[in-house]
């Protein structure tokens, strides 16, 4: 019985070829036995639904619906890591107030985003007023650009305004030698537009 066991072990040991022999023979001539075959199957980790994709930008966009328009001006989701959502606030008082509403906020977030049901456990609050100040500054700059554009539109002459008529007469005098009506009209338009910006 022992001899049979030893022969079986030696047969298995000799079924594998040495690396040097494999390299000499070439890999194309060797056959891979089922014992040598390696199959890779990734392990499924975590609970069901944990590997589902989550779009963080959609959370940021729907944040006013979840928390309310008034509070959304003072806080914003920052990151989602290790089963916790970090929320950035502009004042410690908002962090403290939102901490009391943590359970309700978690429920609202989980109903709005079912993929977070198993992967979101807690909310952390971080205070940084400079972020909100920068956002306010950017909004003011955009509003300033819009005002400048509105002023340019207001500066545009109306067809029946005295300034427009005066410039039109100057342009007609300047381009009276041009025979083509189409070319003369275009040059007149360019002349008036160039004078408006001055």
Image (cartoon, helix red, strand yellow):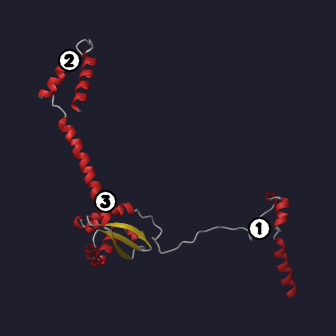
Give x and y (percent) for residue 10: 85, 78
Q: Earlier in the sequence, mark 3 or mark 2?
A: 3
Residue in the foreground of this view, choosing between 53 and 172: 172
Q: Which mark is residue 134?
A: 3
Q: Residues within 10 Å of mark 1 (few under 14, many from 20)?
A: few
Quadrant of image for the C terminus: top left
The furthest residue to the front: 198
Residue 4 horizontal side relative to residue 196, left or right: right
The furthest residue to the right: 3
Q: Residue at x 82, y 61 (%)?
A: 23
Q: Which mark is residue 21?
A: none
Q: Residues within 10 Å of mark 3 (few under 14, many from 20)?
A: few
Provide the secondary structure element on which disc 2 rests. helix
Residue 143 horizontal side relative to residue 32, left or right: left
Q: Residue at x 36, y 75 (%)?
A: 124
Distance Cα–Cα, label 3 vs label 1: 65 Å
- Residue under pointer 1: 33
Provide the secondary structure element on which disc 1 rests. loop
Q: Residue at x 26, y 25 (%)?
A: 190
Give x and y (percent) for residue 177: 25, 11
Q: Earlier in the sequence, mark 3 or mark 1?
A: 1
Residue in the foreground of this view, choosing between 62 and 99: 99
> Which quadrant of the structure image shows residue 152?
top left
């Amino acid at each position: 019985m022992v001899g049979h066991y030893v022969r079986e072990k030696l047969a298995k040991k000799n079924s594998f070829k040495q690396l040097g022999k494999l390299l000499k023979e070439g890999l194309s001539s060797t056959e891979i036995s089922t014992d040598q075959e390696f199959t890779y199957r990734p392990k499924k980790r975590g609970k069901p639904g944990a590997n589902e994709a989550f779009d963080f930008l959609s959370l940021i966009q729907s944040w006013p619906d979840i928390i309310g328009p008034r509070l959304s001006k003072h806080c914003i989701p920052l990151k989602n890591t290790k089963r916790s959502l970090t929320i950035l606030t502009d004042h410690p008082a908002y962090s403290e107030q939102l901490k009391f509403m943590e359970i309700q906020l978690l429920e609202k977030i989980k109903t709005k985003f079912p993929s977070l049901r198993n992967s979101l456990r807690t909310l952390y609050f971080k205070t940084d007023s400079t972020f909100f100040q920068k956002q306010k500054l950017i909004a003011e700059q955009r509003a300033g650009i819009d005002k400048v554009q509105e002023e340019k539109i207001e500066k545009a002459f109306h067809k029946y305004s005295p300034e427009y008529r005066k410039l039109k007469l100057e342009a007609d005098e300047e381009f009276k030698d041009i025979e083509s009506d189409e070319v003369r009209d275009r040059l007149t338009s360019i002349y008036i537009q160039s004078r408006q910006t001055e």
